[in-house]
Image (tube, rainbow, N blue to C red):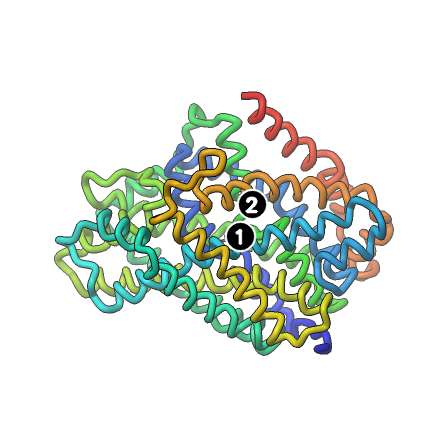
Amino acid sequence: MEVRKNFGSKLGVVLAAAGSAVGLGNVWRFPTEVGNNGGAAFILIYLLCVILIGAPVMLSEFVVGRHTHTNTITAYRRLAPGSWWRFEGVAGVFVAFLILSYYVVISGWTLYYLIESARGSLSTDQDFTADFTSFVSHPWIPIVYAVLFMGMTHLVVARGVQSGIERCSKLMMPLLLLIIVVLVGCSFQMPGAHDGLSFLLKPDFSKVTTRVILSAMGQAFFSLSIAMGCLCTYASYFSSDTRLVRTALNVSIIDTAVAVLSGFIIFPAVFSVAGVEVNAGPGLVFITLPHVFQMAFSSYPLVGYLFSVLFYLLLLLAALTSAISLHESVTAYVLESTGMSRQKATLVVSLSCLVLSVACSLSFGPWSELKVFGMTIFELFDFAASKVIMLLSGIVICLFVGWRLDKKMVEAEVTNGGTVPFRLFRFYLFLIRFVVPIVISAIFVNELLR
Ligand code: PFF
């Protein structure tokens, strides 16, 4: 069995965890949710969810992971032997597997769009909707791209924590942040920048319902990668001097900044082209944006070309670092529970996950009529993982750390044995003991009773 390694540097810790958090959820899902749920009002609720709910849950996961230095399933088993709490670990790893299966499908689309835009085949006189529909519903082409993307993820995870995950995060995250800055700069020059920004910055509270709050919370969980075993697994590679509170704050700030900046890239562009709908739904980045890029820069085709290549590269990098964390969450368990080599464990996870990915991909084409509870396979996986299990899991994590674990042990973990002061410890305990479980449950019940 391989010797367990920790991340080698503080920067590596933050970039790997931020890499997990920053993903398609920031660049694709967040702007779509903002567009559908009333712009700035949604953003404000989202920020509250990150501060009061997301960051405390993240910190709790860090406590469990770093304290046990093992994969998520074994971590809960060790901390609560023989009790029901141990199923929290199982739920985390199971959801990571489920999310990875459909995440690679969408990431595969991203890879396809990157290649197409680099080849210069996205042109103004094209029917982007028809192209997108015929691509995603094709029986095997999207599967090939999903396999390619899984191959990239596989290669990184197979190389291990330091030479794979950490090294790759240190390379890709700075590049990703640089691309964002360049694209925001470009977007601000566009004619629709003013309208796009006021859509993002002027709140309209008439749109706020419990459904919007539930969406914001689900989005915050998904975007921060919490309640899925990923951050717990990464925290198991933190060393004893990693500052948990600071890391949770840094990751939450980077993740939220990237989400909002993605809005700053997308909305000025969308508002620059007459007749394009803001709430264009999930097709936003694959139908609306390619069209917008070409139209907005029709007099400067080279700028349009570079803009779209950079944009899809950004999406791909973001997707890759997140997929790596999902993969690692499952691989760490397989590796440590079976004693397999890392190479073998990674292969088992990649191949078995691809079976589900094929089903997800087909649900956009030949299997689109196959419905379970009125949802396609893809919709079902996304709904189960990111709307239900994830939020319930969030409640369980908080109750576990807040009530079941010894308070002294939690405090020692959060303060590195008393060496790093954390003045808000009591407030944090109050949040995870009462606020987070009550708020999430209340919103759930409200939705169920509708
Ligand atoms: N946070 C990632 C995103 O925003 O796309 C997705 C994700 C990664 C979700 C890892 C869950 C996870 F455990």
Q: Is residue 299 above or below residue 339?
A: above
Identify the residue at horizontal 65%, vertical 72% (top origin): 7
Quarter of the image with the N terminus is bottom right
Residue type indicated by callout 2: Ala
**Taking 138 as reference, is 24 left or right?**
right
Q: Which class describes the residues within 10 Å of circle 1: few (<14), some (14-19), or many (20+)?
A: many
The residue beneath circle 2 is: 385
Spot occupied by residue 267 in the image (x, y as percentages of width and height): 32, 45
Query: Is the residue marked 1 within 8 Å of ligand 1, measured from its CB?
Result: yes
Q: In the image shown, does 195 or 330 lie closer to the viewer? A: 330
Disc with the residue nearer the chain's start (2 vs 1): 1
Residue type indicated by callout 1: Ile
Identify the residue at horizontal 13%, vertical 53% (top origin): 125
Mark on residue 99?
1
Mark on residue 56?
none
Residues at discs 2 and 1 in contact (Cβ within 8 Å): yes
Query: Is the residue marked 2 within 8 Å of ligand 1, measured from its CB?
Result: no
Q: Is residue 352 above or below residue 165?
A: above
Can residue 314 be seen in the rendering of this structure? no
Q: In the image shown, does 45 or 291 lie closer to the viewer? A: 291
Q: Which class describes the residues within 10 Å of circle 2: few (<14), some (14-19), or many (20+)?
A: many
